């Protein structure tokens, strides 16, 4: 059985005689090679980030990239006179990508050899393949989500956000307020299920159970009113964070069973997990139902148990548990009789009304 090809998450481009035809220091009007722009756009649409490692004059190169209308496609460009292996290493570190997720394209065999020697896990390609890279399996993710298509813009917004945070002088709450954060909790749509699947697979630290939900299973749940699959998205004045959280719960008479709560580590500093949980507790209080939450300890998710405990969840036995199926081995069941909550005055929250659905369900 063939093993799946490890996907490239970032392609690093050389410039002279790779991205464009010629040497910039000899001809300031160099033009892109045929097919290169199509490759750049195709990879960007698939959520594959792109950067630059080039021995060149930085200001001159950036000016030409801007004139060609493609400068914005490249994140964290490294243009100077140092070793290209070091440039690729720095890009990977700042993106927090493993070297296995990086790729490099250059016309000169000695430059590719230098990168391969310093970074053996980085995949290297000759420039003559540049226009056909988009056809290779490692550049074709199995799922392309809404967040994939805007991944570059989300990273660029994140870099601007981080830079402003580093320069900000004052309490964290004041900076958070200045971001004008908007958090939205809504029922997952068909086009979001791929991203939800990805969140359940890749979110390990801020994940209450570590259970993976495949897209087909999520689709079945979405179609059944006894289940809720909720997505959490965040934006601020810098731009979108994209889908950053998921809640999976089952409705039972008198109790909502939270089977999964997971959020991206990117939004820990915003307190997103605590706000989602406070909203859920408030919704349960409005619906006059108890909450039952699954928690399965892993090596990385201790913080999620703390979040539940801080919200008041405990190991109580309650008659409300009767309609809930037995839990799997290793799963802890945490119980809460909810009370109305005061939600954030710093983050603007827009959310579905689960309590109205509960009232409808009881009436029917």
Image: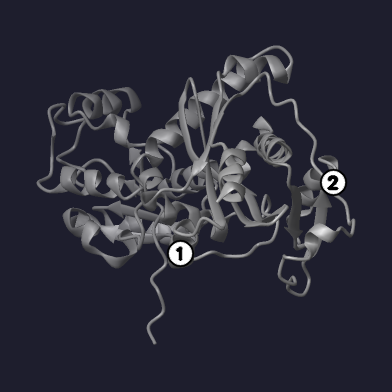
Q: Nearer the viewer, mark 2 or mark 1?
A: 1
Q: Is residue 78 visible?
A: no
**Closer to us: 277 or 13:** 277
Neighbor class of circle 2 (other Cα within 10 Å; few <14, some 14-19, many 20+) is: some
Left or right position of 331 against 119: right
Where does the image place residue 235, in percent across and percent down from the top left?
49, 28
Q: Is residue 128 above or below residue 278?
A: below
**Closer to us: 7 or 271:** 271
Where does the image place residue 342, in percent across and percent down from the top left?
74, 25
Left or right position of 271 against 161: right
Q: How many marks?
A: 2
Q: How is the image coloured?
A: one colour
Q: Are marks 2 and 1 in contact (CB under 8 Å)?
A: no
Neighbor class of circle 1 (other Cα within 10 Å; few <14, some 14-19, many 20+) is: few
Task: Give the numbered dot on residue 143.
Answer: none
- Residue at image point 43% right, 60% down: 122
Residue pushed farthest left? Answer: 34
Q: Is residue 171 visible?
A: yes
**Closer to us: 311 or 46:** 311
Query: Which image quadrant is residue 207 in?
Result: bottom right
User: Which residue is tagged 2?
Assistant: 309
Left or right position of 256 against 83: right
User: Which residue is tagged 1?
Assistant: 220
Left or right position of 66 against 12: left
Give whichever of discs 2 and 1 has the lower sequence position. Answer: 1
Residue pushed farthest bottom? Answer: 1
- Residue at image point 61% right, 46% down: 358
SS label for mark 1 = helix
Residue pushed farthest right? Answer: 316
SS label for mark 2 = helix
Where does the image place residue 301, in percent across and percent down from the top left?
74, 55
């Amino acid at each position: 059985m063939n093993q799946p090809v490890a996907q490239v998450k970032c392609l690093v481009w050389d410039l002279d005689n790779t991205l464009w035809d010629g040497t910039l220091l000899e001809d300031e009007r160099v033009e892109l090679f045929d097919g290169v722009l199509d490759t750049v756009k195709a990879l960007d649409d698939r959520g594959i980030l792109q950067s630059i490692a080039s021995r060149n004059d930085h200001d001159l190169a950036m000016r030409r990239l801007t004139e060609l209308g493609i400068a914005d496609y490249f994140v964290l460009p490294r243009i100077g006179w140092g070793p290209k292996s070091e440039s690729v290493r720095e890009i990977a570190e700042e993106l927090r990508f493993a070297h296995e997720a990086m790729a490099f394209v250059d016309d000169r065999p000695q430059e590719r050899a230098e990168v391969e020697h310093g970074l053996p896990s980085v995949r290297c390609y000759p420039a003559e393949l540049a226009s056909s890279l988009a056809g290779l399996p490692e550049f074709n993710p199995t799922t392309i989500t809404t967040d994939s298509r805007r991944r570059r813009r989300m990273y660029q917004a994140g870099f601007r956000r981080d830079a402003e945070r580093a320069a900000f002088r004052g309490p964290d709450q004041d900076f958070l307020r200045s971001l004008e954060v908007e958090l939205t909790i809504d029922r997952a749509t068909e086009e979001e299920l791929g991203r939800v699947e990805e969140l359940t697979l890749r979110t390990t630290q801020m994940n209450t159970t570590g259970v993976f939900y495949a897209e087909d299973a999520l689709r079945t749940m979405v179609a059944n009113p006894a289940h809720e699959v909720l997505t959490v998205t965040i934006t601020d004045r810098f731009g979108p964070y994209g889908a950053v959280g998921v809640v999976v719960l089952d409705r039972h008479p008198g109790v909502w069973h939270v089977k999964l709560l997971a959020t991206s580590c990117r939004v820990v500093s915003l307190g997103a997990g605590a706000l989602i949980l406070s909203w859920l507790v408030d919704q349960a209080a409005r619906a006059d139902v108890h909450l039952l939450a699954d928690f399965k300890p892993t090596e990385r998710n201790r913080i999620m148990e703390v979040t539940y405990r801080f919200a008041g969840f405990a190991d109580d036995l309650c008659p409300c548990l009767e309609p809930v199926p037995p839990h799997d081995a290793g799963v802890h069941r945490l119980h809460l009789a909810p009370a109305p909550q005061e939600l954030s005055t710093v983050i603007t929250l827009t959310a579905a009304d689960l309590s109205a659905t509960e009232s409808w369900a009881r009436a029917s």
